[in-house]
Image (cartoon, rainbow, N blue to C red):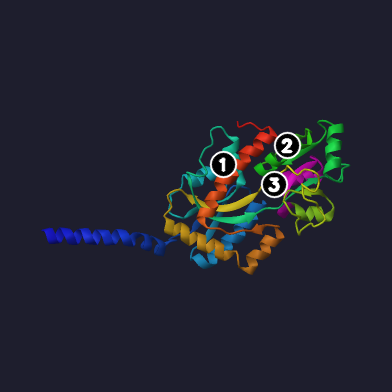
Amino acid sequence: MQRRSFNALALGSMATLAAPSLRAQSFPSKPIRVVVPFPPGAATDTIARAFAQAVSASIGQPLVVENKAGADGAIAGTEVARAAPDGHTLLFATNSPMSAVPAMKKNPPYDPVRDFAPVSDIGRYTFFMVVHPSVPAKNVAELVAYAKANPGKLSYATGNTTGIVSTALFNALGGIQMVQVPYKGEPQALTDLVAGRVQFMVVSAGTSIGFIREGRLRAIAVTLSKRSPAAPDVPTIAEAGMPKFSLTSWAAVFAPAGTPPEIVARLNKEFNAAMSRPELIAVMDKQSFMLNGSTPEQLGTLVRDQLESFRSTLKIAGVEPD
């Protein structure tokens, strides 16, 4: 009896030790859902689909992009936070659901640190400050002067929280007021901006660079700390006269909290490997998106740091959580 009990215990222990390895070997066992918090055609959608194609080629199962737009990314974030922690549901997140929503809501629907397992940092977006050509302002200083001389005349479009927070910060630092016109995503907002129904927008390079090059929009600044290769003549916001303007727009991949570490490690390996593939790099270059891989631990640090950064930025902009 004692020998049988000992043998059973030993076998049980061996099975427990082998379980993580078996999970890793059997993953993925079905298609992987990649939930994107913005509509089709948005910069994040384009980037996520390029990664889905690249990772599908090596991981052994298709990565299927699902667009769950709305509520500044909170709809997508909530869905993934509540999903089974088996690695088959991922969030292709930006600072909108992971930094802005928790910072802008008194009672956010999830905790970006507690409710998600970081997989990998993906990179940084390029955002331009653009005006419709009908606006008689060629640079930031002229726009601020025009807005002060014409209070309430200028309206601005927002299609994501980067646009919302960036413009609120711009208004606060410039001492001006423009009227916000919110949209569910950048494509719809950009359509009205190009048509002249709104006059100003902070917009991603991927969706706007074509209009800028065609002269249908005028770029007056880039929100990065250095000029963009996509439009090297456009000054940084610091060069344009607002050195206190600081906002990072990033993208990363997350799984639900509780996802086994070995599955997270496999996903991290696949997403980081995809960043060296020429076909994916070509898509990122067109989007003016700067790739930046990481370990899960480094991404976890980024999430915590950016949450505090957004809270500080909102205070400067005078935006109260609702």
Q: Are marks 1 and 3 in contact (CB under 8 Å)?
A: no
Residue carrying label 3:
186
* Residue 57, quarter of picture: bottom right
- Chain part drawn in magenta: 185-207
* Residue 169, quarter of picture: top right
The answer to whether residue 165 is left or right of residue 7 is right
Residue 1 locus on image (x, y percent): 10, 58
Q: Nearer the viewer, residue 26 or 6?
A: 6
Residue carrying label 2:
181
C-alpha separation, residue under disc 1 versus residue under disc 3: 16 Å
Q: Residues within 10 Å of mark 3 (few under 14, many from 20)?
A: many
The answer to whether residue 198 is left or right of residue 93 is right
Residue 168 locus on image (x, y percent): 71, 37
Residue carrying label 1:
74
Q: Is residue 250 above or below residue 19?
A: above
Under mark 1, the amino acid is: Ala
Under mark 3, the amino acid is: Glu
Q: Is residue 273 above or below residue 142?
A: below
Instruction: Tell which circle, 2 or 3, labels the residue nearer the N-terminal end.
Output: 2
Q: Nearer the viewer, residue 308 or 151?
A: 308
Residue at 80% in and 57% down: 232
C-alpha separation, residue under disc 2 versus residue under disc 3: 12 Å
Under mark 2, the amino acid is: Val
Instruction: Tell which circle, 1 or 3, labels the residue nearer the N-terminal end.
Output: 1
Q: Are marks 1 and 2 in contact (CB under 8 Å)?
A: no
Q: Nearer the viewer, residue 185 or 93?
A: 93
